[in-house]
Structures are given as structure tokens and as C-alpha cells.
Image (spheres, rainbow, N blue to C red):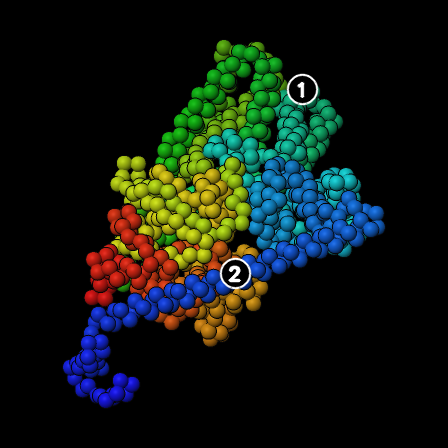
Amino acid sequence: MADDDILWMPVPSGSVQYGALYGAEAAGDLLIDAALWQQMVNQQYRLLSAVDRWIEGLERAHEDRTAAGIKAGEAVRARADQALLASIGRPERAGRASAGADGADDDATFAVCRRVAEAAGITLTEPPKSGPVNDRVSPVERIATGSRIRTRAVRLAGRWWRTNTGPLVGHWAKSGAPVALLWRRGRYEAVNPASGLRIRIGENQAEELEPRAVMFYRPLPERPVTAWLLLRFSLRGTAPDVRHLAIGGLVTVALGALVPIATGQVLGVYVPTAEKSLIVQVALAVMIAGIVSAAFMLLQNLTVLRLEGRMESMLQPAVWDRLLRLPTRFFTERSTGELASAAMGVSAVRRLMSGIGPVALQAGTVGGMNLVLLLCYSVPLALAAIAMLVVIGAVFLGMGLWQLRWQRELVELGNKLNNQAFQTLRGLPKLRVAAAESFAYAAWAREFARSRELQQRAGRIKNLTTVLDAVCLPLCSLTMFMLLAGPARGSMSAGEFLTFNTSVTMLLTSVTQLSGVLVSAAAALPMFEQIKPVFDEAPEVRGAGAQPGTLSGGIETRKLSFRYTEDGPLVLDDVSLTVRPGEFVAIVGPSGCGKSTLLRLLIGFDRPASGSVLFDGQDLAALDQAAVRRQCGVVLQNAQPLTGSILDCICGTEAFTQEEAWEAAEMAGLAEDIKRMPMGLHTMIAGGGAISGGQRQRLMIAQALVRRPRILFFDEATSALDNETQRIVIESTRRLSASRVVIAHRLSTVMDADRVIVMSDGRIVEQGAPAELLAHAGGHLHELVRRQMA
């Protein structure tokens, strides 16, 4: 056989060797060789990784060339504009031909927003000139977001310019120019801050404005809030109402002084002398005074209603804003029911305190006026009356404080019952599975019975106070008669005594009212104590946070350590890692090794005990963390969508189109499921209860991808997905060229990563390419995979 001849020889089993260089083995023997299969897998991973890096390099090069071309085109256009302007004698504007109009518009918008904010008692921060710009957000919203101010869209309907709803930012319909809508002298005015021009709004002017305006909500100070500061905050801008309330109260009190004086004159002077005409005149005067007093009291009540509405509109949004700005650890230390009770408790405190003010003002002025009358008629009897009223006031105050003891326990128990009811209803499926409904009912019934007992105790004290209030008036009158018949005999005439006795009665009524006011004010203390933790906690983001600019996706941790309590064990210990822009990093490890804790530190939910987290070389602790998160897509473990339509869940509060929502659903592998639903994107879901676990995860992924962020954080975000759907999600996120930090256990997820970081006991024990780590038989990743496959 010649050297170049080809020899075909079948090998049914075993192996054969031809010479010293070539050999052959049976195909069946090859298929059962594990080492050969492992080598083939390794070669495939190396090949696919190399191809993937090559493709990503081509895509980045294409993006760089495109960006460079756009930049070069803009430079050429700018030079052409400069040459054209120079040719017509206007060279000074060439350098700002493209950006001048936008800059002027932004400056005009900020000037209008600042004028409206000043009228509302808000300090605005000028937005940075550079940084990410979201075209879906209006300039007014961008300014409000940069100053951490909540806003609300207001519809200008009907004769809106005659009702004061607070300062507004509006726009002219034709030009779209912003304008400040400020209340002045009974109607709104359109104010241009640049020119100072003021236009009184009427029907014609209202038609020239867009039917939508924006209202700014004033936030609470970033420092801890005391009760006095909260009262000052809620009363800002209400000076006219308070002034009208005080004037009305003084007029009512002055007219009320006619009653004791007229009583003494009529019964002491006019009746004995049969002065019928004077009696009729006095009666008419008292009647007219009563009508005028009733009218002023009606105006007072209307003023109080308006005052309550304004206080509510300022206070309740400010409390919710404060809640939403608190750090995440604040919510982990308290139940949802407690937080809900605290947030809504401020309304109860406001209602209680707003009713106290007018009553205290009126009772104080009436009491002061009648005290002056008593001293004018008889100083000794006035001192005796004052001593008697002090004793009565002390008794009523003691009864109120006794009632307050049970009231405090009742408020605490009521909040506990609300929290227990909320948790029971939320966990009802689990209770039903465990057949533990009876135990839940027994626990609720025990606390409810205790609350009924406390209510009965407080009710008994209230009934006793009512009885004493009814008895005090005749006792005081009897005491005055005894004093006049004894030690003070002959000190005053019958008419003077009638006036004196009427004044004592009115003074006693004022004292009992003031005692009730003090007790009511004390009853607000337990409610305020429930809200106090919200006011004492500092917001997560303060004014000193720097803007991060446009993030490229680079992430780094330096010697990161964390513990949940000051004396607790370290959950993370000296963790240092780097994520390059566009890199896919998977973090794996046994349960409790600190993976989710590391992710919470990366997104700023917790603060490290030592070390730092950096985004593009900027320390997260010094940045506006909310601005950082707006450039990230985050899907946490067991995340739940909000109640609403699927479109609302995907888009959130930003103005994404339905096409963009469909694209996000496609990237998350959810589009086909949505198409099979009767209402498509408008299908309503309630907390994820109408969809499966896998659909819920894909919905949360679509919510994270709709903004096309530069950084993605996934915490077991694909654990409920099948392999095909997971492949769609991985490919979609790869096309975004975003940095991806994924916590996962499934081998299929880990194998697609550029780098795998293995954690154990709060430390990084291994990291590298997945194929390299799997090839190491004694490695940590190899052991994790072996346990998973066992």
C-alpha cells in the first residue's frame, strides 16, 4: 500500500493503531468518555465567549463611529452657522446658535418656577446644566425633581381664576411660554418674572392659557420636625384667615358683653321703674346683637373650614413626601400597618387641633371680658369667684388627664389592631393553608376586647365630667347668693348683682371650655407620638447630594463591610469588586452568604459599616442616590407590582408610549402572554394576584427595562422562568450593552455571565470566567454546581 493511499477500516469495538502517529477508536467508546465531553464543552464555551466578545466589540465600535459621526456633523453645522452669521454681520451669536433658544427657554421656565415656589414658601435648586436629560419629562418636572419637590397636575376648569388653590405654573396656549399664576386680591394673575408684567385673569385671558397647570407641594424641613415646627408649617399662608378669625371672635365677644349688662339694667333698673320703652329698646338691641353675633359666628365657621382645608392640603402631602424619602431601613424596622396608621394619624391630629384653636380663642376672650366686668363691680366677690373657678378648672383638668391615661393606651391598641387586621388579611392564604384561621381570630378578639374595656373606662370618666359640668353652674350661683346674703350684704344693688352673676356664669362656661380644650390638646399627644418616628428620622437624600451625571456603568466596591446592628456579626467582610461598563457579572453562593445584602448596598438601600460603593469613580454616599437609581433598572427578590393595569405597571409615572411598553414586554418575554389576555396591556392586576409567578417576574423585568438603563441589578429575577424565557431575557439585556449584576443560583444563568463571583460567609472566595471556574474540580463554583445537579 502506497503512502498516499487511503485505508478505510471499520472499528466495531476497541481501538487500532497504524504506525506510531495515528490511531482510531470505536464511536461507542468515545461517547462514554466523560473527559472528552468535558473538553468539548470547554472548547465550546471558549469559542462562544470569544465570538460574543468579538460581536460586542463590533457593536461598541459601531456605536462609537456613529456617535463620532453625529458629533462631527454637529461641529460642521456649527461652523456653517458661524460662517453664515458672520457673512450677514452677526458673528457674536454664532457660538450659541443651536443652544441659545433651549437655554433661554430653560431659564424662563426656572424663573417662573422660582417665582411660584417663593409664593408657596419653597426654595428651588437650579438644575445642573449637564447630565442626563429625559425628553419624556417636562422642564417643570425636571426642575421639581432636581429640587426634590413633589408636583401635581391641576386642571383649569370652570371659573377657576376666582378660587384660590395656591400658586400654579401655567403655559400660554399659543406660544407655550411658561407663566406664574399667583393669587392676588380675589383672583389669579398671570405674572412674567422676566418683564414683571402682571395680567389679571378673566374669562378671555383664561381661554388663552393651556387647560393644565402644575402645583408644587411644600416639603417638610430635612431636619427632625417638632410639634411646634409642624404647627408653624401647617399655618403658613393662613395669616388672613387667622386674622379674620380673631376679628370675628372679638366682635362676637364684644356683642356678647351686652347680655350681662342688659340683664342687670333691665331687671335692676327698668323693670322696677316700669320703663317699658327702654325695655323694648334694650330687647331690640340684644336681638340685633344676637343676629350680628350669629352672622360673625357663621363667618368664623366658614373661615375654620377653609383653614382646615388649607392645613390638610399642606400637611398630608408633606407627611407622605417625608415617608417616601425616608431610608429603606426605616421601613424594615416597622410593619406596614404601623406606618399606615402613622401617615393617616396626622389628619386626626389636624382635625383635633384645628377645632381647638377657635374654641380656645373665643373662650379666652369671653372669659377675659367677663373677668374685667367682675373686677369693675366688686373686687372681693371677683376674687372669691376666681378662687372658686380655679378649683373647678383644676377638677376638670384632673378628670381630663385621668381620661387621657386610658386614651393613650386606646390609641396604641387601636394602631395595633389596625396593623393586626392588615397583616391577617394579607396573610390569609397562608393561614388557610395552615388551617390557622381560628388562632388569628382569637388573637384579634383578645385585643379587641381589651380596646372595648378601655373605651368603657374612658367613657365613664367622660360621663362623670358631664355630670360635674351640669352641677357646677347651680353650685356657683348658690355660692354667690350665699356670699351676697352673708359677708357681702349691701355691697351692690340688685341690678349690679344680676350683672355680676351673669358674668360669673359666662366666666364659668369659658373656664370649662378652656379645660376641655387643654384635655383635647393633651389627647393629641398619643397620636403625635405615633407619627413622631417619621418626623425624627432624617431623609435618605438631603440637599448636599451631588448629581451623578450620565453613568457609563462602571461599579466598584472598596473594602465593603456591613452589619445589621452595631454589636452584630459582620454580614459582609472586606468585599472588593469591580464591574466594567457593559459587563455581565453573576454573584452566586450558598444561602446567607451576603449576596442580597451586597446588592442592597450597591443600590444604596443600606449604609456600609466601612468601605465605599463607587459609580464611575464617584462615592455613592456623596451622590443623590435617587438620581443614581433613576439610571438603574432593579428587580429585587419577591418584588410585587402595584395595583393597576399592566401598562401602568410597566411605564410607572413616566410618559412612555404603548409601543415602548410592548418593546419592554418583548425583551422580558411577556408580550405573547399579554396578547392572549382579553384587554392586552390594559388588563388590570391587583398586587400580582391575577398573574402567575413567572409572569410577575417578567412584568417586573419589563418595568426595569422600559427605560433602557445603563445598569441592571437582578436579585433572583429569573428564578421562576423556564430556560427559553430566561434566554430571551438574557439576550435582550445583552443588546442593551448595560452593566448587569445578577444574583442567581441556576447554572444556565451563571454560564452566560462574563464573570462569576462566588461568595461564602460574607467574603468573595472565588471569581473568574464560568468555564474556568467549572474546570477547577475543587473550586467553590464546581462544588455548588455539583450539589445542584445531585
As rendered, which of 663 and 298 lies closer to the eye?
663
Q: Which amino acid does label 1 sit on?
A: Val
User: Residue, x 79% and y 50% (percent of image)?
Assistant: 85
Residue 472 appears in the picture as rendered: yes
Q: What element carries label 1?
A: helix
The image quarter in which residue 464 lies: top left
Determine crowd level at label 1: few under 14, some 14-19, many 20+ residues with C-alpha closer than 10 A. Answer: some
Residue 686 appears in the picture as rendered: no
- Residue 269 disc label: 1
Residue 296 percent across, percent down from the top left = 66, 35
Find disc 2 in the rendering and name its residue: 61
Residue 594 percent across, percent down from the top left = 30, 49
Determine crowd level at label 2: few under 14, some 14-19, many 20+ residues with C-alpha closer than 10 A. Answer: few
User: Residue, x 50% and y 39% (percent of image)?
Assistant: 545
The image quarter in which residue 455 lies: top left
Q: What element carries label 2?
A: helix
Up-down relation of residue 750 to residue 555 (above or below): below
- 312 left or right, relative to 699: right
The CA span between labels 2 and 1 is 108 Å
As rendered, which of 518 and 740 lies closer to the eye?
740
Q: Which residue lies furthest to the front in this view?
A: 2
- Residue 229 disc label: none
Q: What residue type is labelled 2?
A: Ala
User: Residue, x 58% and y 14% (percent of image)?
Assistant: 375
User: Residue, x 28% and y 42% (percent of image)?
Assistant: 570
